[in-house]
Amino acid sequence: MNIHFLHGTETGNSEMLCEDLEADLGAGFECSISSLADIKPDELVKDTLYIFVVSTYGSGDVPATAQAFSGALETRPDLSPVRFAIFGLGDMVFAETFAQGSKTLMEQLIASGAAMVGERGVHDASGGDMPEDVALPWFRDILEKLPETAT
């Protein structure tokens, strides 16, 4: 199975988390990691599971590296063959906009017809857990759900 990790980040935390998730995978997966700055929605393909890891920046915005991708989703391209899961990084100190970047991107992908696998995962930077401590169990759960969502 092909898994493509896509990160949107300001400081590199989302990229590092993608690397942690990839390292946790066992055999049987073809993986790649890319910045959302380097991908367009029309490049997403059917035979790949996309794992989005996105931080929140400013007043609940997607980070700079995800802005062009998010902007392209505003036209609602047909992403009906695409499957994805999404994990957000945020900080509850900013409760009104907590993990809003990932929520925005999730809503745009769904509005474009992409099928979401599992629930959106989130990490609270003001909590006591490291991002990978929350993301790894979430990711393993996503992988377990794959047979249920296979097309």
Image: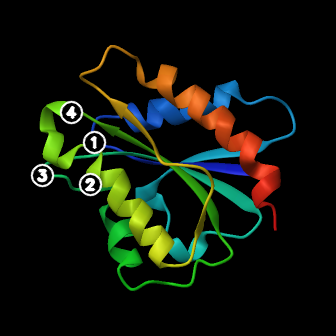
27 to the left or right of 136:
right
Which residue in the protein does label 2 denote?
64
Pointers 2 and 1 in contact (C-beta within 8 Å) = yes
Between circles 3 and 1, the one closer to the viewer is: 3
Identify residue for label 3: 59
Binning the other alpha carbons within 10 Å of mark 1 as few (below 14), some (14 to 19) or many (20 upward) gives some
Q: Are the two marked residues, 2 and 3, in contact with CB atoms closer than 8 angstroms?
A: no
- Mark 1 touches mark 4? (CB < 8 Å): no
Q: Nearer the viewer, mark 1 or mark 4?
A: 4
In the picture, the disc for residue 10 is 1
Q: Quadrant of residue 124?
A: top left
Mark sitting earlier along the chain (2/4): 2
Element on which disc 4 rests: helix
Relative placement, left or right, of 85 versus 31 is: left
Residue 115 appears at what percent x and percent y? Answer: 61, 67
Q: Residue at x 60, y 50 (%)?
A: 118
Provide the residue designation for mark 4. Answer: 92
Mark with earlier residue (2, 3): 3
Q: Say how the picture is coloured.
A: rainbow
Q: Quadrant of the C terminus?
A: bottom right
Mark 2, mark 4: which one is toward the viewer?
4
Q: Nearer the N terminus, badge 1 or badge 4?
A: 1
> Which residue is found at the position 87% from the left and 39% from the top?
28
Instruction: Specify few, some or many for label 4: CA neighbours under 10 Å numbering under 14, 14-19, or 20 or more.
Output: some
67 relative position to 73: left or right:
left
Q: CA distance from mark 2 to mark 4?
A: 21 Å
**In the image, what residue type sits under mark 1?**
Glu
